[in-house]
Amino acid sequence: MIKKLRRQFIVSITASAFALLMVVVCAINFVNIISMDRRTTELLEHICENGGVFNIDEYDDPLFINYKEISYITRFFYVEFSHGGEVAAVNTQNIAAVDDAAAVEYAKAALSSGKADGYGEEMYRYTVKEIGSGKRVCFLDVQEELMYIGSMITISITIALFFFLLLTVVVVLVSGYFIRPVEENSLKQKQFIADAGHELKTPLAIISANTEVLEMTCGENDWTASIRKQTGRMADLVNQMLVLARMEERIDKKNFRTISLSEIAENAADAFAILAEKDGKKIKLSVWPGIRVYCDEKSVSELVNILIDNAVKYSPPESQIDIRLKKKNKSVVFEVENSLIQGEAVDTKRLFDRFYRADKSRSREAGSHGLGLSIAKAVAEKHRADISAHTQNDKIIFTVIFNK
């Protein structure tokens, strides 16, 4: 549980940091792109509106400290067409990479796109303006601007990833420090349960022995029967608490070995068959033969018994309990399905909580303390298996998946 909590802590912190860094990177680059787009739009509008000429006296760009130098670093050209579509004028004096013929081809491609402005080939941005004699298509070389945007995106992502990796290393290193108080409290809690359980066993044994003496000397009566019943319930509760505390300890694989889960499921079903028949219930087995898993046999047997016992106790009379064991891809799937009593509501999210009982009165009658499914969950986690419960068509299905 502590390892899982530590992983969740690391994942939550790093995921939040990654999301925040990506938001910052996107915001920075979005602002750069918008700024570049605005500047080139204004520059193109200025050139087209001034007859394809850059008029320094009428242009003012606050983004440049010495904006009067813009005319010497700006590369542009334009082509004018008559209303009949004939080329009326071409000006490529302000660009060296494009001749008149290429300028006409670029302009015709821009007109054929049907757009008022956009990006053409070779990183040229264009805009189309209606003039008295026809149309003027102005082009602006935005290669440097686009390369700058690309460089900014690469640099910002690289810096963000560097800080993300650095933060991940720091979080991994310090996570143990932040989780240590939780780990210490968990260990103290488990130790308290173990100590309290062992201390309670002695007085319970004495009470039980004294009750037997009273019955032998004074005869059995309702009072002694009640004492025996309650001490028995208390002893069972203490044992379950000790089992749960043991299951939640760190994995000790010295007792792990490859066993036949098929045989465990079949033997458990046979053991509960007689108990189920008392209420007219029927156990139906669908177990693939020869399914083997690497596990602690005692713990897994307890898990299987808990789920089948739970189904027998809480299914309605004259109903069927289905026990299934099969392979799915590389995993082993064990399922126990039983009907729900009509009108019974089950909170499947809380079923594995300690001391949770869906129907408290019926649970007391069945002798349940609400720890069985908690033990089953602890066993599953100990074996890195997934355990869950869901309802479907007035039935509840418990599923355990042993992953390879």
Image: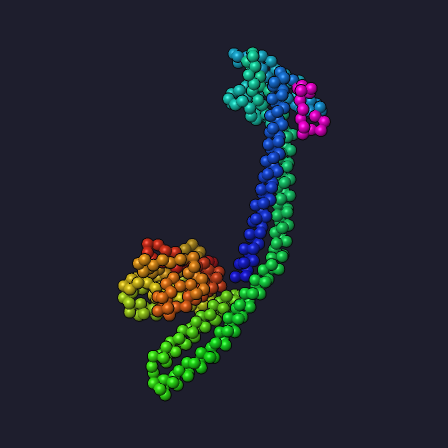
Residue 244 appears in the rendering:
yes
**Quick check: 229 above or below 215?**
above
Q: Residue furthest front?
A: 223
Residue drawn at 60 percent across, 33 percent down:
33
Number of residue marks: 0
Task: Locate residue 296, reporting x and y percent.
Answer: 47, 67
Q: Nearer the viewer, residue 292 or 244?
A: 244
Q: Nearer the viewer, residue 207 or 67?
A: 207
> What span is colored magenta in the figure?
54-67
Tell me where residue 337 appears, x and y as whole percent. Answer: 35, 60
Question: Within the magenta stretch, is there residue 268?
Answer: no
Task: Quadrant for residue 206, please give it.
Answer: bottom left
Give the dominant element type of the magenta stretch: helix, strand or loop: loop
Tell whether 241 sits left or right of 270: right
Relative side of 172 to 290, left or right = right
In the image, is residue 144 above or below residue 278?
above
Q: Is residue 253 left or right of residue 333?
A: right
> Who's the residue at 61% across and 51% down the image?
168
- Residue located 47% across and 58% down the image: 404
Q: How is the image coloured?
A: rainbow
**Residue at (60, 13) in percent of width and height:** 89
Spot the residue most to the bottom.
217
- Asked whether residue 401 is in view, the answer is no
Residue 322: horizontal and vertical position, in percent? 33, 61
Q: Find residue 313 and report its horizontal and vertical position in percent.
A: 34, 66
Side of 48 relative to 193 (left or right): right
